[in-house]
Amino acid sequence: MKSIAVFNNKGGVGKTTLTYHLGYALAELGYKTLLVDLDPQSNLTLYGLTPEELHEVWEVEDAFIDDFRQARDKIPPDQFDCIASGVRSIHFLLKPTEDGIDDPAQLSKPLPLHENLGLIPGRLSTHMFEDKIPSRWSDIYRGDPQAIRTVTRIRSLCVEYSQKYSYDFVVIDTSPSLGILNKVIISTVDGFIIPCMPDMFSLYGIQNIGNALKGWKQEFDTISMLLSDNKLRDFPRRFVSFLGFTIYNASRYKGSTPWNLSQAHYNYAQQIPATIREHIQSDLWKHLNEDQLEDSIGNTIIMHTHSTRPTMAQKYKTPMWKVPSCGNLKGKDKTTVSGNRNLYESTRQHYHIFAKDLLTRLQQLETESND
């Protein structure tokens, strides 16, 4: 199993759309994939559940989020087992660690999105788990078991799900933040990708990410030196690797520049690789060759704006390429979609190409790690 985070400290760059469609593309290519919604805004979850269905999931969990032990002890064991084994949010799964009690004996089932694709829903209250991390972080250095469990629980959940359901990949949607929850996520996944807009904000965002990664890696390396092998068993063998960037949701100006961007956008896009080299440590991307470092993942294949197609995909709980054939289009949506059927359906090949490029980079990372 390889865990991948889609990460940028700037919002509005298409992280959630990219996460969902990457997961679906991997699933269609035959790889069992789990999506985990760790952005408290829970937009990824709305690709799988209606707001009403999500409310039902959260409502069952409310008492457990307030006090897990008390809620568990108030009901018969068989009733608790039924609740715990159903589709549960990521905060429900993290709550026993947050409260310092034992995890349920059974693993909650993921929400099925496709034969090879599952989802762990998000929850607005996930900030409560994040609030618990700072008070425990310093205790890691002296090997405190509860502190170690808190910092590694997201990764260990990914491992448990991959073992039970044979997932090849876990793809995590993150919040647009450099806060401590993302510090934990990024420090314990295998790799991350950065979706960017071709603008000034993305260049500064990469600088901020690079500066944060330097500090996070220093702490990771210190922990690796201080703790015994037994206490390091739930940590990854190495600090996270950078898998590349993708320019996403950019306006198309056909023939204007080599990437069909406006000249101003192209000028910013051309600065992204140099900004990565300068601000993200080279040992995090040494498995990439020069062409991969210079190029957006998949080149221009998903670079340009999808217009309203992602909104339609989320509305009908299906990837963009399946919207025209989903069978339940309503009202004006039928006309809008039928008139753009080719644009919708062509996104399938585009995301498959993107996923294959990412798989090549992951294979190089695996080869470099084994060497």
Image: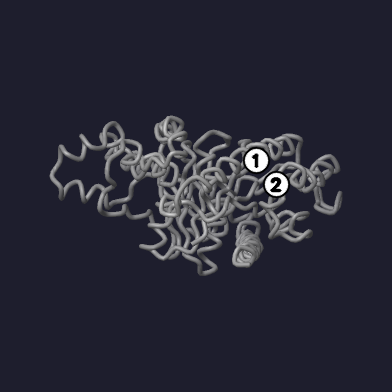
Mark 1 touching mark 2, by CB under 8 A?
yes
Q: Is residue 349 left or right of residue 69?
A: right
User: In the rendering, which numbered label is found on residue 285?
Assistant: none
Local packing at callout 1 (Cα closer than 10 Å; few below 14, some 14-19, many 20+) is: some
- Secondary structure of residue under mark 2: loop
Question: Which residue does the image show at 60% across and 41% down from the upper left?
Answer: 218
**Displayed quadrant of residue 58:** top left
Question: Residue under circle 1?
Answer: 214
How does the figure colour the protein chain or chains? one colour
How far, Cα to Cα, is label 1 from label 2? 7 Å
Q: Is residue 137 left or right of residue 364?
A: left
Q: Earlier in the sequence, mark 1 or mark 2?
A: 1
Residue 349 shows in the view: no
Question: Which residue does the image show at 57% across and 35% down from the upper left?
Answer: 177
| Residue 51 position within the rendered picture, expressed as x and y whole percent measured from the top left | 40, 40
Question: Residue under circle 2?
Answer: 281
